[in-house]
Amino acid sequence: MLSFILSIFPIILLIYLMVKRNALPSYVALPWIATLVMGVHLLHFDTDIVTISANVVSAIVAVQTPITVIFGAILFNRFSEVSGATDVMRKWLGNINPNPVAQLMIIGWAFAFMIEGASGFGTPAAIAAPILVGLGFHPLKVAMLALVMNSVPVSFGAVGTPTWFGFGPLNLPADMVLQIGAVTAFIHSVAALIIPILALSIVVSWQEIRKNLLFIYISVFACVVPYFLLAQVNNEFPSLIGGAIGLFISVWAANRNIGLAKVENTLDNQAVTTSQIIKALFPTGLLIAFLIVTRIQQLPFKAMMNDTTVWFSTVLGSLGTFEISQGLIFSLKNIFGSQVSSSYKLLYVPALIPFIITVLIAIPVFKVSGANVKQIFSSSLKQTKNPFIALVGALVMVNLMLVGGDHSMVKIIGRTFADVSGSNWTIFSSFLGAIGSFFSGSNTVSNLTFGSVQLSTAETTGLSVVLILALQSVGGAMGNMVCINNIVAVSSVLNISNQEGPIIKKTIVPMVIYGIIAAVSALLLVPLFYTL
């Protein structure tokens, strides 16, 4: 019993520190909790200092993967702002159709869906919400809509980081991670039949929703169908490609007024030219092209970028063996003489390719000055400081909670949860994921933090590991609706003060409904479509 209390206490304390009045930000709370977990290992579990130190170093190496993706995503977003591409996109999207439902679905749903797939990390709300406010929508209602809408694509945000990296420490087989993504997308797709409607109801009347229901579902299915299909074969493309396809179909339908009630035309049809739109879409198109070319199995690039053949190797004293492979995979092996190793795939991690390369190619196309280029890179680097600290804390905590095999902290927590909930854990699983993103602001951090607990609980209860981890990922996405970080970010962008409480009170309802949909889907629908 004492082992369970000491194992669960750091998680409970983390939640408390991040939700209390004057809450600590994740970049402060997570490193402190990681330090606490180290203390528990040393004083209660008698873990040797070499194992602890090796896992800390491993976390510092492993964190390069998500932090470079975050840097690339922020860089791409900053470039789009400074170059004027985002401004052109705003004008174009805002002048497609005067119907408010069309504007909310195109910008708040489809456009945000695509941006989530490319950038993630709160970017969609920051870009989409100001466009909607500029069109005359109420800022507070727009903030709520943006938070609720930005849930379905989140598990595959930032080119799939929450899925392929979030569950990385569990060392699952690649085909299992792919199946987790497929089931995750299925549950999200079921929720997508209801969640956008709930989001719209915050801003417009139910009467307006009924009048424009056909267009709403054209836009929903235009994103969700390719998203679901891609998730069956890939963990990186679903939100990005699904959102891009959905955006163009939604724009096409809105231009022809398909499924939309007619309203008075108040648009400026001369806002942007076709050539300006094409130029503004060039960086996103290039980004997608790079991703496709480097991820298709039949092309040689994927194998080249993942080539583990050792090209260079040297011993770094007691630290371990440093290796560089022919695919430019940097590895630190046998850290401090232990079995712990970690690596970073320079070419395959979606950071240098596609984000940084895309920006470097686009700079001369948009004729961005040297001073602006310097500012774009320096501000992007500065913005990654706090996420870096938070992710190091999260990874150290997770790595140490996994130490000990059957006697690890996560196994102890998992066995206790299993004893209490039994086979009913599918009902609660997604809400644990939601708690993770609520306090951390990230589906990735939620999966890193609670993925091991969910895995242990699934194994102990005999439930499907794939299903439970899919529910964890869905929960991490739906938790974005009530996440303090996201609420503060979108409120800051829209200049809304002291409205965090009212926002949470409104967004927690669709979040709970999302969790119910996830549980029902897991119990009734998933077994019909998947052999788990």
Image (tube, rainbow, N blue to C red):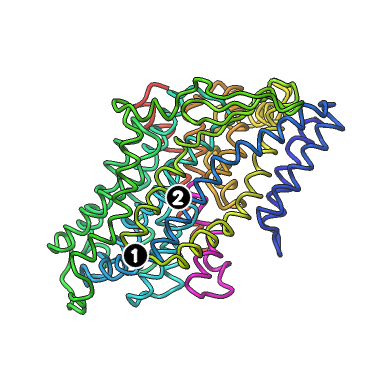
Identify the image quadrant of residue 268: bottom left
Residue 260, image x, y percentages: 18, 64
Q: What residue lies at 79% left-to-right and 42% top-to-bottom?
A: 36
Going by the numbered disc 1, the residue's amino acid type is Lys
Residue at numbered disc 1: 367
Position of the N terminus, as image quadrant, is top right
Task: Reply above or below: 137 against 188.
Answer: below
Residue 469, image x, y percentages: 51, 32
Position of the C terminus, as image quadrant, is top left
State whether the magenta stretch is mostly helix, strand or loop: helix
Q: What residue lies at 72% left-to-right and 47% top-to-bottom?
A: 31
Residue at numbered disc 2: 513
Badge nearest the viewer, 2 or 1:
1
Task: Reply above or below: 188 against 410.
Answer: below
Distance between the Cα atoms at labels 2 and 1? 48 Å
Identify the image quadrant of residue 344: top right
Q: Earlier in the sequence, mark 2 or mark 1?
A: 1
Going by the numbered disc 2, the residue's amino acid type is Ile
State the extent of the magenta-drawn residues as a range.
477-503
Name the residue nearer the viewer: 345 or 54.
Answer: 345
Local packing at callout 1 (Cα closer than 10 Å; few below 14, some 14-19, many 20+) is few
